[in-house]
Amino acid sequence: MTQSTELDPEDRKIITLARSARARNGVAEGAAVRDETGRTYVAATVELPTLKLSALRTAVAMAVASGAVSLEGAAVVTGADVLAPEDVAAVRDLGGPETPVLLVSPAGVVKSAG
């Protein structure tokens, strides 16, 4: 797969932010999304008794709540080999079918870019 150093600088930025969120919070996933103005939204997995959200869905919700009208990119750092369809769907709802969603290992290696 691809090392993050071969990516566009803006994609490297959201990967770095997602990795930091995951490590800082000690959770399963960290995610970051970039909106149409270049603003980034960073989130970690939410695990409360009454609220459970993936990091990516949390980041998308933060973008929407902040007034974003579309997304240019998304990255998820996780040990998983695939993303939940609901996570990708959340990005597609706001960003459309062409918005790249990077699945990244905790070591920063891009496993897929769908």
Image (tube, rainbow, N blue to C red):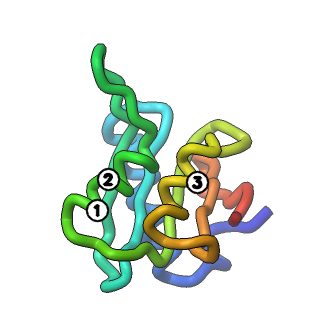
Badge 3 amino acid: Val
Question: Furthest residue to the left?
Answer: 66
Task: Specify whether 3 is left or right of 47.
Answer: right
The residue under the point 42% across, 44% down is 55
Depth check, front residue: 93 or 20: 93
| Residue under label 3 | 88
| 23 lies above or below 18 | above
Q: Residues within 10 Å of mark 2 (few under 14, many from 20)?
A: some
* CA gap, disc 1 and disc 3: 15 Å
Disc 2 target residue: 61
Q: How far separated are the C-alphas under marks 2 and 3?
A: 13 Å
Taking the image as shown, residue 83 lies to the left or right of residue 35, namely: right
Q: Alpha carbon of mark 1 to alpha carbon of mark 2: how far? A: 5 Å
- Could you tell me which residue is drawn at 61 percent across and 62 percent down? 102
Residue 29 in the image, given as x and y percentages of width and height: 48, 40
Could you say where residue 7 lies in the image, as x and y percent from the top left?
A: 62, 78
Q: Element type at marker 2?
A: helix
Q: Which tag, 2 or 3, sits closer to the chain's start?
A: 2
Whether residue 14 is situated above or below residue 47 in the rendered picture: below
Q: Considering the image in quadrants, where does the C terminus appear?
A: bottom right
Q: Circle 1 is placed at which residue position?
A: 64
Which residue is rendered at x = 38% and y = 56% of the image?
60
Q: As displayed, is residue 94 above or below residue 51?
A: below
Q: Which of pointers 1 and 3 lies earlier in the amino acid sequence?
A: 1
- Relative to residue 4, is residue 25 drawn left or right? left
> Which kind of residue does numbered mark 2 sit on?
Ala
Secondary-structure class at tag 1: helix
Q: Where the N terminus falls, by quadrant? A: bottom right
Cβ atoms under marks 1 and 2 closer than 8 Å: yes
Nearer-the-camera pick, 77 or 89: 89
Expressed as whole percent of the image width and height from the top left, the position of residue 73 reads 50, 72
